[in-house]
Amino acid sequence: MMFNPGTLNLTNSTHLWLEIPEAERTKIWQQSQAFSTSNRRWMAYLNRLSLNAFLPWLRAEHTPNAAVFPNIAALPSVWEVVNGVGISLEGKRLVLIPSEAVDLSELRVPQEWVDIPSWTADYYLAVQVNFEEGCMRIWGYTTQALLKNMGSYDASDRAYCLDGQDLIFNLNILWMASQICPEEATRAEKTAPLPELAIAQARNLLQRLGNPGVILPRLAAPFSTWGALLEHGGWRQRLYEQRQGQQQQWSITQWLQTGVSDFAQKFGWASIESQLNFAGARSSQQASTLPILVRKVTIAGQQYELRVQPKTNIEDRVWRIELHNATEGEMIPSGFKLRLLTEDLQPFDGNQVQAKTAVDRLYIEVALGDLQEGLVWEIEPTPEDFEHEILLF
C-alpha cells in the first residue's frame, strides 16, 4: 500500500513511502523467532517487513514476475548471518538493505551481496523502517558499479559504504533507466569466483560456526572461505539449522522411516505411497511399503517431480533418483539432464543422464558405501528458484 508522506510532515517526496500496518508488523514478528540470537531475530524482522511491503508494490507497479532471491524457503538461512534480501526481476537483481536508523548519512552493503558471484546485484536500495509512523521508505539506491567505484570498503564489518549524498534519491530513475538504457553497465566488473571448499574444510567450518555462541560467524573466517560456504545452498542451510540446535534434517533414510522433516517440507519435499514398478525392484514387504520421496520443481513454467527411493531395501544402500513430468502422460523433453554430485559439487562415474529424445522419465541409480554420504542433485535446464541441496544417504 502506498503511503502519503504529507501526513507526517516529513521531507523529500521523491522517496518511495510504503505503509506497514500494525497487524502486519505483529504477524511478521511472530514469524521471525526462529533465529539464534535476539539480534538475528530483529534483523530478520526488519528484512521481512521490508520485503512484504516492497515486493507487492513492485509486482503491481513495475514487474509482475519479480521473485525473491534465492527463494522464500532459503531466506532464514540468509538472515541468520547477513542483512539484506535479494529480488530478481527481468534479468536484473536488486537487494534491499533495511535499517531502523534515523541517520541517513550512508548506505552500508554487506560484502556478501557484492562479492559472492551468484549473489551480486545490479542495484542496492537503502531502506529505512519507521516503526513510530508505521511505514518504510526507499531513500536512495545505487548500482554495483557506483558502489565499487565511488564507495569505500570497511574491513571491520566487511561492508561497502557509500555516502548518502552519492545515492540516487528518486527510485523512478531506476525504472526509467532500465527501460531507456536496458544495456546500462550496472556492474563494475565480473565478480571473481570464490575457492572451492573440500568437504572436510566445510564440515570443520560448520562445526565451529554452527555454534550459536559465535555471535558474528560472517566475521569469524576469511571472506573467501566464508563466501564459498555461504554460496553453497546446502551448506548454508545446514549452518542455519545447526545454529538452531537442529541436526540431520536432510537424512533420506530418516525421511522414509519417520517422515520428511519440517525444514525440508518448506523446500517442497514430501512423500507419496510407494509404487515399485521399475525393473530390478524386489517385491519384499519392506521395500513395497516404503514411500517415495518427491520434490516438485518448475522448469520453463512446467511442473516436474524429482523422486528418490531405495531400489530394494534401505540396508542395501542402492538408490534410484528419477525425474518425471508432473502431468500424467506428458514427457520429459529432449536435452534435459539429471545429474548427481558429491557434497562438494564434484562429479563421479555414472553421475549424469541426458534425454536424447522425449522420454517418460530420467533416472540414475547409485550404490553407496556403509558410511553416510551427501549427494547434491542438479537438473538442466535449471529449475526456478534453484539452490543446491545436500541429501544425506
Image: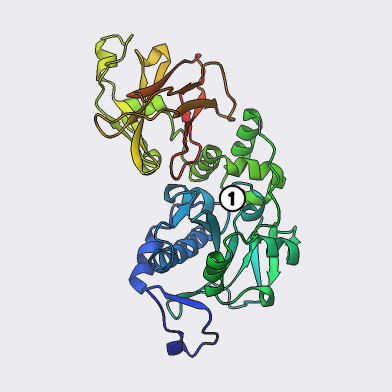
Nearer the observer, 363 or 173: 173
In this rendering, would 130 be left or right of 220? left
Measuring 49% from the left and 41% from the top, which residue is drawn there?
387
User: Label 1 belongs to which residue?
Assistant: 119
Percent across and percent down for residue 137 are: 50, 75
Q: Quadrant of residue 151?
A: bottom right
Nearer the observer, 205 or 184: 184
In this rendering, would 50 be left or right of 282? right
Vertically, is 150 above or below 379?
A: below
Measuring 53% from the left and 78% from the top, which residue is drawn there?
15
Percent across and percent down for residue 266 are: 38, 44
Measuring 65% from the left and 65% from the top, which residue is drawn there?
108
Q: Quadrant of residue 355?
A: top left
Vertically, is 142 above or below 165?
A: above
The three-letter code of the residue at mark 1 reads: Trp
**Which quarter of the rendering shows the N terminus?**
bottom left
Q: Mark 1: give few (<14), some (14-19) or many (20+) Cα within 10 Å.
A: some
Does residue 130 appear anywhere in the picture?
no
Percent across and percent down for residue 338 are: 45, 27
Nearer the observer, 349 or 333: 333
Measuring 39% from the left and 38% from the top, which residue is drawn there?
264
In this rendering, would 274 be left or right of 173? left
Does residue 352 appear anywhere in the picture?
yes
